[in-house]
Image (tube, rainbow, N blue to C red):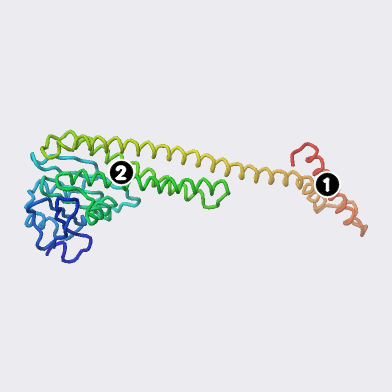
């Protein structure tokens, strides 16, 4: 059984050398002339056997690609091939589930494995379909460029969310706190992914592989681009911190005002409660018990006392 038998999301493309690519059936696909790109979901059943039988990948390469490693890793397998393991942002990673993007690249082959839809894979495939993709040996550079472009688009989206959230805070939006928590989580995850991509680009630029030497300068440009994206993300995180402090200050101010009002109310009613409690004791000698109008007089006295207390508070500008 091959991964293409029961899973969607897998595909094979043969680059035509002019920025385009033509699809190839997975059942018939084998590395041949030109550069072939194979992509599979990471959890495809029978994937290891397919990689061994169809692509002829050695056991060390298959072990690296299918391992449970979650850290960034760059391994030069031989003078022609390298393996890249990258983390991808994932809000709720399930225990035991392999995450991230795994890449095996040689001069004539590129294999990508991902546990879910990856924006850079989708973008690169679209560029190839439009005839605007990489030509041959610069495929890895094209993949890195697609990842950088998708990250920039994500930063723009998060910046728009930040502007909208700042407007909501100004308008006293009730759901601003939860939106801010979601936004900060997204920013932190994206920053981790961009930082990992930058580290990979730096490490790849140091490898002594023939077909990568001509791409060292563009790799450095992408590294500088990643640094710029990280600065933008740091700026957004600073704005998120300021917004969080402002929200917290407003919440503290509302809580303090509520406590202040409750304190004033308690201060006004404390003498009244004392008087009514004193007159309610069950002992003899309570004045006014034999006079029918004593209750009305008591209510008027309590009302006058409450008004006097409120006037005293207003005079001292406490209310």
| Residue depicted at x 24% and y 55% | 130
- Give the camera-side residue of 162 and 97: 162
In this view, the mark in front (2 or 1): 2
Q: Give the answer, above or below, for where 36 lies relative to 263.
A: below
- Give the camera-side residue of 40 and 144: 144
- Give the camera-side residue of 266 and 107: 107
- Quarter of the rendering occupied by the C terminus: top right
Q: Earlier in the sequence, mark 2 or mark 1?
A: 2
Q: Position of residue 15 (x, y in %)?
A: 15, 53
In-image side of 108 versus 118 (left or right): left
Q: Position of residue 147 (x, y in %)?
A: 28, 46
Give residue 74's quadrant in the image: top left
- Quarter of the rendering occupied by the N terminus: bottom left
| Residue depicted at x 17% and y 55% | 21
Q: CA distance from mark 2 to mark 1?
A: 64 Å
In-image side of 97 versus 266 (left or right): left
Check disc 2: other Cα within 10 Å, few if <14, some if 14-19, many if 20+: many
Give residue 193's quadrant in the image: top left
Check disc 1: other Cα within 10 Å, few if <14, some if 14-19, many if 20+: few
Disc 2: which residue: 193
Q: Point out the residue furthest to the bottom here.
A: 6
**Which secondary structure lies at badge 1?**
helix
**Which secondary structure lies at badge 2?**
helix
Q: Point out the residue furthest to the front here.
A: 18
Disc 1: which residue: 307
């Amino acid at each position: 059984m091959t991964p293409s038998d029961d899973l969607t999301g897998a595909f094979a493309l043969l680059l035509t050398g002019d920025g385009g690519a033509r699809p190839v059936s997975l059942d018939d696909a084998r590395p041949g002339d030109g550069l072939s790109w194979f992509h599979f979901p990471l959890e495809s059943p029978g994937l290891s056997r397919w990689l061994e039988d169809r692509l002829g990948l050695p056991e060390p390469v298959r072990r690296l690609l299918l391992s449970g490693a979650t850290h960034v890793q760059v391994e030069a397998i031989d003078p022609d091939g390298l393996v890249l393991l990258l983390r991808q942002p994932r809000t709720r990673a399930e225990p035991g589930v392999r995450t991230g993007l795994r890449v095996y690249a040689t001069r004539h082959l590129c294999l990508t494995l991902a546990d879910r839809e990856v924006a850079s894979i989708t973008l690169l495939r679209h560029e190839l379909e439009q005839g605007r993709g990489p030509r041959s040996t610069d495929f890895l550079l094209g993949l890195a460029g697609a990842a950088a472009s998708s990250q920039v688009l994500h930063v723009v989206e998060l910046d728009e969310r930040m502007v909208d959230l700042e407007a909501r805070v100004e308008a006293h939006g009730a759901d601003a706190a939860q939106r801010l928590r979601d936004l900060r989580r997204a920013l932190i995850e994206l920053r981790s992914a961009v930082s990992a991509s930058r580290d990979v680009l730096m490490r790849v630029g140091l490898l002594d592989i023939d077909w990568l030497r001509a791409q060292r300068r563009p790799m450095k440009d992408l590294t500088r681009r990643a640094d710029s994206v990280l600065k933008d993300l740091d700026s957004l995180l600073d704005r998120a911190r300021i917004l969080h402090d402002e929200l917290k200050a407003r919440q503290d101010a509302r809580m303090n005002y509520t406590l202040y009002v409750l304190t004033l109310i308690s201060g006004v009613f404390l003498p009244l409660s004392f008087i009514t409690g004193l007159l309610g004791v069950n002992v003899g000698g309570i004045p006014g018990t034999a006079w029918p109008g004593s209750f009305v007089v008591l209510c008027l006295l309590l009302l006058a006392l409450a008004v006097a207390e409120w006037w005293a508070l207003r005079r001292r500008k406490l209310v």
